[in-house]
């Protein structure tokens, strides 16, 4: 990250805005996870991903990666004793499905207002939808729920939210690339610890541009995480504009 962008993050951190932004994007997402008894009768969490929620001005929708939803369907059909949750709320996401697209690796859901408070969700309300396309070297903040940080207890599951901030490395017609440079990233609230590099489970998390503006700095949703390459230390996200205001997925890649 160049000096100008590092100075921006230092300034936002010192002012208290960056910690507030981290909390905000965490409220706009929930762990999408499912659990039950396996073939040996043992209780366990089978898999998890991330679902983020926004209101387009026309519809309140949840977005995750299609491969997360596909794995949910596979496990649902495989195991008899089975439950699924968005955060702390039990759901049947197939009942709320709006659209899915394997090529885009996106799936969208109609999110009822009634689950927002129990799931501790606050929808993102962009000034317009879709938002302006992201540009290379723009500053963004993004996050999700890595399965490696999950702690399974007897009756509950603790799923920490992990955020990262960086400049956009590359932009193509279909996606954006984010070089993580994990060796040099600051991991908030974990001073002195090596940052968690096992990011499976963050798929479906939102990518938000950081906007310095009066009267208040803010974030704006520009993409959805769908892939992480540990080999190349890269995160890939689909552009937010592939999701139409009604939740349908407009992607011909």
Image (spheres, rainbow, N blue to C red):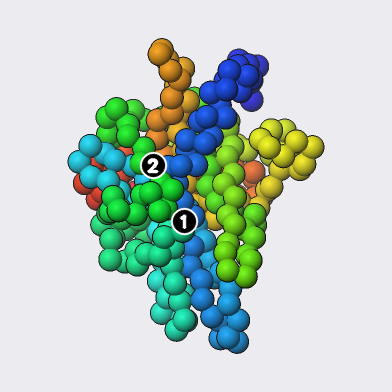
Residue at image point 34% right, 28% down = 132
User: What is the distance, in whole Å, between disc 1 and disc 2 at their CAs?
Assistant: 12 Å
Q: Which residue is mark 1?
A: 87
Q: Which residue is mark 2?
A: 122
Residue at image point 60% right, 81% down = 42
Q: Secondary structure at mark 1?
A: loop
Residue at image point 27% right, 29% down = 128
Residue 51 image point, x, y percent: 43, 52
Residue 203 image point, x, y percent: 49, 52
Q: Residue furthest bottom?
A: 40
> Could you classify mark 2 by the number of other residues whose Cα lies within 10 Å: few (under 14), some (14-19), or many (20 or more)?
some
- Residue 235: which quarter of the image? top right
The quarter of the picture where the N terminus appears is top right
Q: Which mark is residue 108?
A: none
Question: Along the horizontal axis of the image, is 16 left or right of 222?
Answer: right
Q: Secondary structure at mark 2?
A: loop
Residue 52 image point, x, y percent: 41, 47
Q: Earlier in the sequence, mark 1 or mark 2?
A: 1
Task: Indicate whether 192 appears above or below 9.
Answer: below
């Amino acid at each position: 990250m160049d000096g100008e962008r590092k100075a921006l993050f230092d300034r936002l951190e010192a002012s208290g805005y960056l910690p507030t932004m981290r909390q905000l994007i965490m409220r706009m997402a929930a762990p999408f996870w499912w659990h039950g008894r396996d073939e040996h009768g043992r209780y366990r969490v089978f898999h998890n991903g991330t679902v983020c929620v926004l209101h387009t001005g026309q519809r309140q929708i949840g977005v995750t990666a299609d491969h997360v939803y596909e794995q949910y369907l596979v496990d649902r059909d495989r195991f008899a004793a089975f439950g699924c949750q968005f955060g702390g709320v039990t759901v049947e996401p197939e009942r709320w499905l709006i659209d899915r697209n394997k090529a885009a690796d996106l799936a969208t859901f109609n999110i009822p207002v009634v689950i927002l408070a129990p799931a501790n969700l606050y929808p993102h309300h962009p000034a317009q939808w879709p938002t302006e396309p992201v540009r290379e070297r723009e500053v963004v903040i993004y996050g999700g729920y890595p399965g490696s940080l999950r702690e399974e207890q007897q009756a509950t599951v603790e799923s920490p939210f992990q955020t990262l901030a960086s400049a956009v490395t590359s932009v193509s017609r279909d996606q954006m690339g984010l070089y993580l440079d994990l060796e040099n990233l600051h991991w908030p609230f974990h001073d002195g610890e090596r940052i968690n590099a096992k990011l499976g489970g963050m798929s479906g998390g939102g990518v938000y541009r950081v906007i310095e503006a009066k009267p208040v700095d803010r974030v704006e949703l520009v993409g959805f995480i769908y892939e992480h390459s540990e080999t190349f230390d890269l995160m890939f996200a689909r552009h937010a504009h592939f999701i139409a205001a009604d939740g349908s997925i407009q992607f011909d890649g």
